Amino acid sequence: MRSRLRAAARRLRGALSRLGSAAADGLDRAGVIDRGRLRETLDLAWPRIVTGFAIMSKNTVDLAVVGIALGAPSVAGLAFAFAYWQLAKFVSIGLAGGTVSLVSQNYGGGEGGRAALVVKGSLVAALALVAPIIAGFVAFAEPLIALVGGEGTALRAGTTYLVVTAPALAFEFFNMIASRTYAGVGDTFTPMVVRAGGAILNVVLTVWLVLGVGLGVLGAGLGTAVSIAAVGIALSWGMTGRSYFGHGASPVPVGRAGPWIDADLVRQLLRVSAPLIARRVAEGVAVFPLLWIASSFGDATVAALEVGRRVRALLGSFSWGFSIAASTLVGQRLGAGEESLATEYGRDVIRLSALVYVLASAVVVLAADPIAGVFVDDPAAVAATAAFVVVAAVSAIPLGVGGSVTGSLRGAGDTRWPFAASMVGSYVVAIPVALLGLATPLGVGGLYAAVIAEKLVPAGLNLARFRSNRWQAVSRQYRPDAADDSSVE
């Protein structure tokens, strides 16, 4: 019996291998991506995609479980709290983006010691940034939730969730830097395993605390906070150079010995990270007027908008993989002085992400009604939520393409242009379009258009930047051989 099972397993693996080989050949012949670069891209991308789903599932699970237990008003409260929590998290993503850019270029150039100093500087900067954020969220949670339209049940739910989860931001900042450090040296598998384990723990704790123990929103917040802390503790083991059963030790370990601050590297880190942080924070701030506009149509619309945003965030997990693959591969090629090859890698990843997003978004559009039914059960609420799910799926296509383009630019250290593009998409186009819904019969349709525009506009602008090749010149000031020339701009 066992021999037959082993034989069947071998046949299955063989069939899957042949299928994968045929798909790789087809993508190569179609001009989507070179077969060799496909393997490199997927080796880096798939663990990050799984990691993205694991991380994004936290808030999604909280939203679904609270919706089942408490209804739309409490879901709206979580939407308000998520906006603040994500705003803080975007700061960590921006800092981590600068980290992966410098780590990948220095590591690719054979400067492992400098790469480790980049990580140390990032951790110091993270601590300085996150401490006042946590204090502010805990002290002013209720007025912050009320500021964006929280009232009654939504206000109470949002306040509770924000107070409970705010301290976990300290671990989340570390988690982001650790994950991007691993990605910068070509290891996306280790953080994937740890992050996926944290996601499973979050699901178990949240379901138990909310539906089993009956703690409601408090339980959802506790489940999320504990799981994030557990991930941070686990990642700290590998980041100090220790292995997980013989694997996963960071090749740029962080230890107490040696200097923690290198002034030149810190300046480079801040120069690269500042536009990323500004772009991410500005994107996060743009959510607040959208939530305020949605609250004008009632808690059900706020809940529907948030479900759509959560669905898009889950689809965005593909971009986690493709973007980090682009940053790492482009950055390493630039660090080695191979600009033409860096361009080829960037183009291939962009085309592959476009294909994947078209297919994935089509599946979500077809399944919009059952997806909406996971979060709400009233027929009218399901219809409203399904509409936002469709809009979110459509907007995920430019989100995915834009993510790969931005990843390529980030690998070069070219972070200012994506920041400006994001500002145009959010503030020049999306928010004014959403406001039209309040002033004209467009109504909720203004929110639909805004959700699409905030991703479509920057994707187009960033793609134009990539095609100009100006990002290659920007990268030259961040390569190892430019370490002593801090005057280059």
Image (tube, helix red, strand yellow):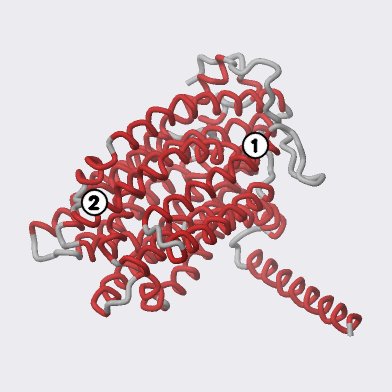
Check disc 1: other Cα within 10 Å, few if <14, some if 14-19, many if 20+. some
Where, quadrant-wise, is the N terminus in this rendering? bottom right
Residue drawn at x 40%, y 40% as measured from the top left: 166
Residue 41 location (% of width, % of height): 65, 53
Residue at point 20%, 46% (across, down): 146
Mark 1 vs mark 2: in front? 2
In depth, the one of 400 and 317 nearer the eye is 317
Report the residue at 42% width, 55% height from top.
220
In the image, 16 versus 481, the foreground residue is: 16
Q: Which label number is shown at residue 236?
A: 1
Residue 376 lies in what quarter of the image? bottom left
Left or right, 269 with respect to 119, comes to left
Q: Earlier in the sequence, mark 1 or mark 2?
A: 2
Give me the disc on residue 467.
none
Q: Is residue 353 visible?
A: yes
Seen in the image, is 469 located left or right of residue 433?
Answer: right
Q: Residue 409 appears at what percent x and percent y? A: 50, 40
Q: Is residue 348 visible?
A: no
| Closer-to-camera residue (214/474) | 214
> Where in the figure is residue 173, as x and y percent of width and height?
50, 37
Q: Residue at x 69, y 25 (%)?
A: 255
Task: Give, as a three-letter code, the residue at label 1.
Answer: Ser
Number of callouts: 2
Q: Report which residue position mark 2 lands on.
A: 155
Q: Secondary structure at mark 1?
A: helix
Q: Is residue 464 above or below residue 135?
A: below
Q: Quadrant of residue 281?
A: top left
Q: Is residue 295 left or right of residue 486?
A: left
Which three-letter amino acid code belongs to the residue tagged 2? Answer: Leu
Picture coordinates of residue 96, whole percent (x, y): 52, 36
Relative to 379, say whether 295 is above or below: above
